[in-house]
Image (cartoon, rainbow, N blue to C red):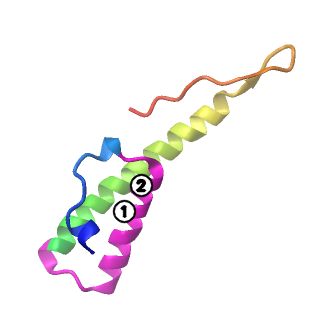
Amino acid sequence: MSDVAAPSPDLSALTFEQALAELEKIVATLESGQAPLEQSIAMYERGAALKALCEQRLEAARLRVEKIVVGPQGSVAAEPAEFS
């Protein structure tokens, strides 16, 4: 639980996988009911931010896949997605 109690404040530095793993830890801790009220509230806030980040990253990935096009000679090209 120490990972959940002292999360990294910088969400933008997290990969999708890191954010999802942290979110899963938070959910498990909250579901266990073992965290004090104030810590639970802070964890819930962090979880909401992580959820939003994961949704943003998934949407960017979806848009990137949609931008993949096949050229006239069968070559495949993709435009990079922005994760801002």
Say which mark, if any, is on residue 22.
1
Q: Quadrant of the C terminus?
A: top left
- Predominant SS along the magenta part: helix
Nearer the observer, 69 or 25: 25
| Quarter occupied by residue 21 | bottom left
Q: Is residue 63 left or right of residue 22?
A: right
Pointer 2 local density, CA inside 10 Å: few below 14, some 14–19, many at least 20 = some
Image position of 64 with respect to 58: above or below: above
Pointer 1 local density, CA inside 10 Å: few below 14, some 14–19, many at least 20 = many
The residue labelled by disc 2 is 18
Q: Quadrant of the N terminus?
A: bottom left
Image position of 76 with respect to 13: above or below: above
Could you tell me which residue is drawn at 24 percent across and 53 percent down?
8
Could you tell me which residue is drawn at 28 percent across and 67 percent down?
3
Image position of 71 with respect to 47: above or below: above
Q: How far across and how far down the image is residue 20, in percent?
A: 44, 59
Three-letter code for the amino acid on which mark 1 is drawn: Glu
Q: How far across and how far down the image is residue 32, in percent?
A: 32, 85
Q: Is residue 30 left or right of residue 5?
A: right
Q: Is residue 63 left or right of residue 30?
A: right
Could you tell me which residue is drawn at 52 percent across and 42 percent down?
59
Task: Give the number of callouts.
Answer: 2
Q: Find out whether residue 42 is within the magenta segment.
A: no
Residue bounds of the magenta highlight: 14-38
Check whether the beta carbons of the residues at disc 2 and disc 1 lie within 8 A of each other. yes
| Quarter occupied by residue 68 | top right
Q: How far across and how far down the image is residue 58, in percent?
A: 52, 46
Q: Is residue 17 left or right of residue 41?
A: right
Instruction: Say what secondary structure mark 1 lies in.
Output: helix
Q: Find out whether residue 33 is within the magenta segment.
A: yes
User: Hey, which residue is sitting farthest top in the picture?
Assistant: 72
